Amino acid sequence: MKKTAMIVGMMTLASVQVVHANEGHDMSGHEMKQHAQHMAPDGMKHEHQKMDMASGMFLEKKEVDGYTVSFHIMPAKDGMGHGGSHNLMVKVEQDGKALTDVLINSKVFHPNNSSESKMLMKMGDWYMAGYDLGHAGKHGIMILFKTADGKKHKASVYYTEVK
């Protein structure tokens, strides 16, 4: 169990470093930017969706009730799927500081109209769950998170798997 937790922690740290390394760089035509307000009419302030088409990594940030919620989706490496083909990672921040005392439940709506829910597990500053997102189409991803003050907040994004 300790070995698995350590491997997952190292994978999470490595993926976060890759995301930070890619932020702000021109991906020379490999970056897809779409304004999320056109995709998710939920009334929240959205930043641009970013997806590096070469690696399949996705990062989108949303402002929700004074919190910054980062959605990060990437294909799972062999043996590191945590229940799916892709790892969904979420970070909740307030005033630039990651909150590590939140509870997060997630739900994915697949292109075939099926859905599934999972609690996210804490991995450092991030929370994570595995989902099968490898089939083509637009997946709706919704989270509900509860902060230490007992209040509940929700956020959602769309993730499109291109085949």
Image (cartoon, rainbow, N blue to C red):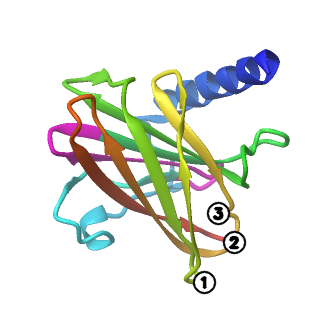
| Circle 3 Cα neighbour tier, 10 Å, few/some/many (<14 / 14–19 / ≥20) | many
Q: Label 1 amino acid?
A: Asn
* Residue type for callout 2: His
Q: Give me the C-alpha separation between circle 1 and circle 2.
A: 10 Å
Q: Main secondary structure of the magenta part?
A: strand
Q: Is residue 152 left or right of residue 58?
A: left
- List the single residue furthest toward the front: 150
Question: Which residue: 30% across, 69% down?
Answer: 40
Disc 2 is placed on an element classified as loop
Of badges 1 and 2, nearer the viewer stands 1
The reply to whether residue 154 is visible in this rendering is yes
- For residue 55: magenta? yes
Are the two marked residues, 2 and 3, in contact with CB atoms closer than 8 angstroms? yes
Question: Residue at (21%, 41%) from the top-left corner?
Answer: 151
Which residue is the site of mark 1? Answer: 112
Q: Residues within 10 Å of mark 1 (few under 14, many from 20)?
A: few
Label 1–label 2 contact, CB within 8 A: yes
- Provide the residue designation for mark 3: 133
The image position of residue 78, as x and y in percent, is: 84, 43
The magenta span reads 52-68
In-front residue for pair 130/103? 103
Above-or-below relation of 86 to 24:
below
The amino acid at mark 3 is Leu
Q: Quadrant of the C terminus?
A: bottom right
Residue pictured at 59% horizontal, 56% vertical: 53
Task: Identify the mark at residue 135; answer none if there is no mark.
Answer: 2
Quadrant of the rendered image containing residue 46: bottom left
Q: Give the spatial CA distance, label 3 vs label 1.
A: 12 Å
Residue 73 in the image: above or below residue 160: above
